[in-house]
Image (spheres, rainbow, N blue to C red):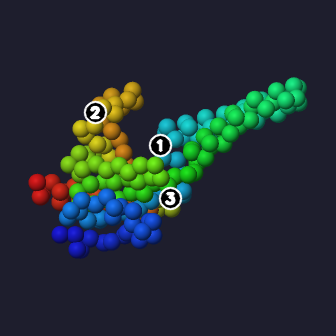
């Protein structure tokens, strides 16, 4: 069924980490990774980036001022500078996300966790084309109402593939996988 699908899979993803998580008869249709050129993932990420810059600026200002005025009292500012460095790193870099679409699931992997959702729960697929042919393919996951938060009152969980190369092609592969999955049901 998927023999004619263009394979844009890059085989340099840690010896294809997703092979360890495949179910019987499941095949990878696409896999990709977060690219730094994709920019900030969302409004919340932009807010976090702005907050982290302000945090570290104030922490450095306070620590330097405390050292000048109070000597060793400035040592209390060093942990806040370290927190600021962590916040900046998490806002602008350190994205190690790997993504995959199979004939049964969408999958994400980072250095801390593996998550997958069945295609039957994927709804509202959308595309955001960015510069340099890098963009986002986002979607909602129905049926996970326990993850509701104050910004998402409809009870759906939004996930996606952020900062991926060729987002239009990823969007098309995901939509075709959804069509094929629903036809098999």
Say few, some or many: other residues with alpha carbon within 10 Å of mark 3 (under 14 / 14 to 19 / 20 or more): some
Q: Mark 3 points at which residue?
A: 35
Residue 178 lies in quadrant:
bottom left
* C-alpha gap between disc 1 and disc 2: 21 Å
Say few, some or many: other residues with alpha carbon within 10 Å of mark 2 (under 14 / 14 to 19 / 20 or more): few
Q: Name the residue under label 1.
A: 42
- Please say if 3 is above or below 105: below
* C-alpha gap between disc 3 and disc 2: 30 Å
Give the secondary structure at mark 1.
loop
Quadrant including the N terminus: bottom left
Between disc 3 and disc 1, whose residue precedes?
3
Seen at 47% across and 43% down, the residue is 42
Which residue occupies the foreground of this view, 71 or 91?
Answer: 71
Q: Select label 1 or label 2 by which is in front.
A: 2
Which residue occupies the foreground of this view, 98 or 123?
Answer: 98
Residue 71 lies in quadrant:
top right
Give the secondary structure at mark 2.
helix
Seen at 68% across and 39% down, the residue is 82
Q: How many marks?
A: 3
Q: Can residue 128 be seen in this view?
A: no
Residue 44, percent from left and from top: 49, 37
Between disc 1 and disc 2, whose residue precedes?
1
Seen at 66% across and 42% down, the residue is 85
Seen at 17% across and 60% down, the residue is 180
Q: Mark 2 points at which residue?
A: 145
On screen, residue 112 versus residue 143, left or right, reads: right
Residue 124, percent from left and from top: 28, 45
Q: Can residue 142 be seen in this view?
A: yes
On screen, residue 135 versus residue 25, left or right, reads: right
Kindly check if marks 3 and 1 are in contact, taking CB atoms under 8 A apart as contact.
no
Say few, some or many: other residues with alpha carbon within 10 Å of mark 1 (under 14 / 14 to 19 / 20 or more): few
């Amino acid at each position: 069924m998927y023999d004619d699908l263009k394979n844009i899979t890059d085989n340099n993803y840690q010896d294809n980490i997703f092979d360890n998580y495949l179910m019987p008869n499941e095949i990878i249709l696409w896999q990709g990774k977060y690219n730094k050129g994709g920019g900030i993932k969302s409004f919340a990420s932009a807010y976090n980036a702005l907050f982290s810059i302000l945090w570290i600026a104030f922490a450095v200002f306070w620590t330097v001022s405390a050292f000048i005025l109070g000597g060793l009292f400035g040592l209390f500012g060093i942990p806040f500078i370290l927190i600021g460095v962590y916040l900046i790193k998490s806002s602008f870099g350190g994205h190690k996300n790997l993504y995959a679409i199979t004939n049964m699931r969408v999958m994400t992997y980072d250095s801390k966790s593996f998550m997958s959702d069945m295609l039957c729960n994927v709804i509202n697929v959308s595309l955001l084309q960015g510069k340099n042919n890098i963009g986002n393919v986002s979607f909602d996951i129905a049926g996970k109402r326990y993850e509701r938060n104050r910004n998402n009152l409809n009870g759906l969980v939004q996930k996606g593939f952020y900062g991926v190369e060729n987002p239009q092609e990823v969007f098309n592969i995901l939509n075709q996988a959804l069509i094929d999955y629903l036809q098999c049901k």
